Amino acid sequence: MKKDKLHIHWYPGHIAKAEKKLKEQLSLVDAVIEVVDARIPISSRYDNITRLLNQKPRFLLINKSDLVDRNELHKYIKYLEHETKVTVLPTTSLNLKDVKAIVNESVRLSEPKIQSLIAKGLLRRPARIMVVGLPNVGKSSIINKLTISSKTKTGAKAGVTRQQQWVRINPQLELLDTPGIIPMKQEDQQKAIKLAFVNSVGENAYSNEFVARALLDILNDKQKEVFKQFYNIAQDVDLTVENIAFSRKWLKQRNAPDIERTCAYILKDFRAGKIGKFILDEIPQQPAQT
């Protein structure tokens, strides 16, 4: 299928399937950890997330915070806390120092459900949580981080789908070891393009050239200077795909710039955090949707 250079595409059948699976998983848990990408902490959230999660208690983890400037990220944390009215914590997949804070918040959010079960005459059980988010925001790495010292799977629960496996984090908390993938329905093409920047959209949905050029266009002046330094572009030369190709000598016959190769490397270098620590979202003037 030919890729449209002007749009990011999703497929309705895939969206419906993902939404159905997510709803099945949500029915098993007391609370949710919503994971977003620190490079696009607003665009990597799902519009109307409260409706999608059916009012399930949640808090926000801003993952990959090592790929952005922490002082800048603090502004976004404050914004998201104000707009969502939930706890917002920065994290990385490798740093285990914040595991206690993540576990404590999970248990706290689950307690009302536990108390309702006790009120019905049932025995206290561990809180049950799951990790949700758009593709490639780091859900699996968060699950691995939480379970790194708790490898024992407790197996299927009575009345729970057999394929669902649980990991006992501590006596108070169990984690569904399957990440919940939020359906990729996205009407806003600007957000869609940003999701492509960080590889949260399948490569079949776009062309590398379209996304790489869009990435260069969205950079502010300070970020452009960092890109120029990384690719050895002179300050008085425009930051373009073609000029990056010439600088790196990624050329085809007759000294023509190899656009396909250059665009692939621009995206690869940015996603790996090699170029700089950028946040590509702007804090909106209008309230965010929750």
Image (tube, rainbow, N blue to C red):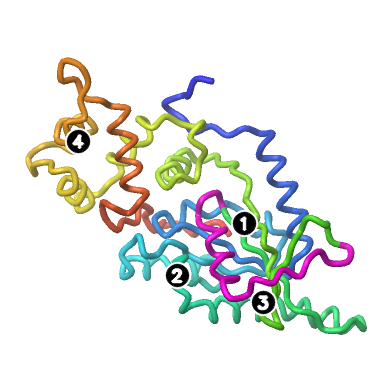
Q: Quadrant of residue 39?
A: bottom left
Q: Nearer the viewer, mark 1 or mark 3?
A: 3
Q: Secondary structure at mark 3?
A: helix
User: Foreground residue, 71 or 243?
Assistant: 243
Q: Secondary structure at mark 1?
A: helix
Task: Report how far apart the C-alphas of labels 2 and 4 lie in the structure.
Answer: 33 Å
Identify the residue at the far top of this view. Answer: 254
Main secondary-structure element of the magenta-colored stretch: loop
Identify the residue at the far right of this view. Answer: 121
The image shows residue 232 at horizontal and vertical percentages of: 13, 43
- Split into 4 quadrants, where in the image is the N terminus? top right
The image shows residue 62 at horizontal and vertical percentages of: 47, 64
Q: Amino acid at mark 2?
A: Pro
- First in sequence, mark 2 or 4: give its number: 2
Task: Report how far apart the C-alphas of labels 4 and 1 lie in the structure.
Answer: 39 Å
Q: Secondary structure at mark 4?
A: helix
Q: Amino acid at mark 4?
A: Ile
Look at mark 1 in the image and give the residue it sits on. 49
Q: Quadrant of residue 176?
A: bottom right
Which label was assigned to residue 90?
Answer: 2
Look at mark 3 in the image and give the residue it sits on. 109
**Crowdedness near tag 3: few (<14), some (14–19) or many (≥20) residues, C-alpha within 10 Å:** some
Q: Amino acid at mark 3?
A: Leu
- First in sequence, mark 2 or 3: give its number: 2
Q: Is residue 80 magenta?
A: no
Q: Secondary structure at mark 2?
A: strand
Contact between labelled residues 2 and 1, with CB atoms less than 8 Å apart = no
